[in-house]
Image (spheres, rainbow, N blue to C red):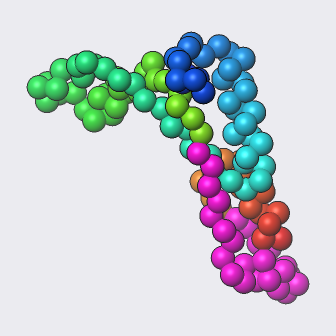
């Protein structure tokens, strides 16, 4: 919801509709289901800071909040963090020994599910 506009392939900028936002989320899900981590790249050009930089009472969080509204989506970047050598075999060995294996991650749920499948 932070992005209100998007950069088109031809370099034009256009407003993001709810359909556009859903399309982006569908793309994120598609890549995430392949164990890819997806980052959205966005920008907000401005002539002046959207807060009083000389006001020492404004917290970093408040400054960040002021800057991250009305962003323009530039695109998505997907990357993979390869499974570490031996993890799939170690998971199978642990399960074979009666150990319940648990994965703790901060990844997006669909990415986490795909990674868990890849490592058994």
Whole-percent x and y of residue 91?
78, 78
Relative to 80, 71 lies left or right: left
Q: Residue at x 35, y 23 (%)?
A: 45
Residue under the image location 83 percent in, 71 percent down: 120
In x, y percent, where is residue 8? 58, 23
Which residue occupies the foreground of this view, 1 or 13?
13
Q: Describe residue 99's horizontal placement relative to residue 41 as left or right.
A: right
Q: Residue 72: image x %, image y %?
A: 49, 24
Is residue 96 one of those drawn in magenta? yes
Whether residue 94 is visible here, answered yes or no, is: no
Give coordinates of residue 17: x percent, y percent: 65, 13
Q: Which residue lies furthest to the left in this view?
A: 54
Is residue 104 placed above or below 37 in the rendered structure? below
Identify whether 86 is placed above or below 4.
below
> Dividing the picture into quarters, in which one does residue 87 lie?
bottom right
Which quarter of the picture shows residue 1?
top right
Instruction: Please say whether residue 21 is visible from this viewpoint.
Output: yes
Which residue does the image show at 72% across and 83% down from the upper left?
Answer: 86
Residue 66 is left or right of residue 94, and the answer is left
In the picture shown, does residue 28 fall above or below 73? below
Q: Point out the residue furthest to the right here.
A: 96
Provide the residue span drawn in magenta.
Answer: 77-103
Is 28 a magenta residue? Answer: no
| Residue depicted at x 80% and y 66% | 118
Q: Is residue 57 left or right of residue 9?
A: left
């Amino acid at each position: 919801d932070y992005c209100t506009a998007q950069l088109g392939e031809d370099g034009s900028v256009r407003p993001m509709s709810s359909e556009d936002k859903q399309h982006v989320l569908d793309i994120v899900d598609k890549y995430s289901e392949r164990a890819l981590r997806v980052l959205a790249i966005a920008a907000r050009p401005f002539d002046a800071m959207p807060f009083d930089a000389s006001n020492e009472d404004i917290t970093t969080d408040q400054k960040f909040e002021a800057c991250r509204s009305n962003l323009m989506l530039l695109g998505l970047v997907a990357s993979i963090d390869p499974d570490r050598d031996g993890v799939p075999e170690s998971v199978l060995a642990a399960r074979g020994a009666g150990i319940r294996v648990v994965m703790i991650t901060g990844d997006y749920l669909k990415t986490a599910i795909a990674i868990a499948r890849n490592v058994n």
